[in-house]
Amino acid sequence: MNISEIKPGERVKDVHFSEDSLSVDLMDGRTISVPLAWYPRLLHADAKQRKNWKISGGGFGIHWPDIDEDLSTEGLLRGAPAPHRAMSNVA
């Protein structure tokens, strides 16, 4: 994220889940909702693991320590799903 693009209102206020989506409330009143399927670690986490989140990155990120997942408001606003991890070819 370019420092000139940082908008204070895009800081995380709250995080909540439905059966199939993640929603992040921002300080400016917007809510970002994305499919849980975009984030396999969150999709496969249990309710206790999902509820254990912390604001990170100066307020612009979310960290789930139990599953080692990190998301940013920038990525959520862009609609960026988790990158696919390539399988290593081990002989």
Image (spheres, grey):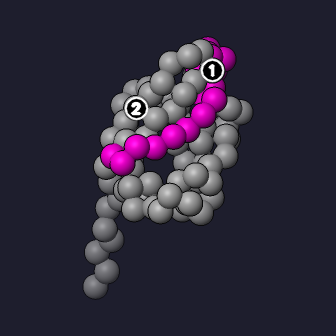
Q: State the residue at coordinates (37%, 36%).
A: 34
Find out whether residue 14 is within the magenta segment. yes
Find out whether residue 58 is within the magenta segment. no
For the residue pair 33 and 69, the one nearer the viewer reads as 33
Q: Which residues are magenta?
A: 3-20
Quadrant where the image shows the N terminus:
top right
Q: State the residue at coordinates (46%, 35%).
A: 23
Element under disc 2: strand
Q: Quadrant of residue 32?
A: top left
Instruction: Tell me: residue 48, above or below residue 25.
Output: below
Mark 2: few, some, or many residues within 10 Å (few <14, many ≥20)?
A: some
What residue is pinned by disc 1?
Answer: 27
Residue 27 position, x and y percent, is 63, 20
Q: State the residue at coordinates (59%, 42%).
A: 62
Tally of numbered tags: 2
Residue 81 in view in this figure: no
Amino acid type indicated by mark 2 = Ser
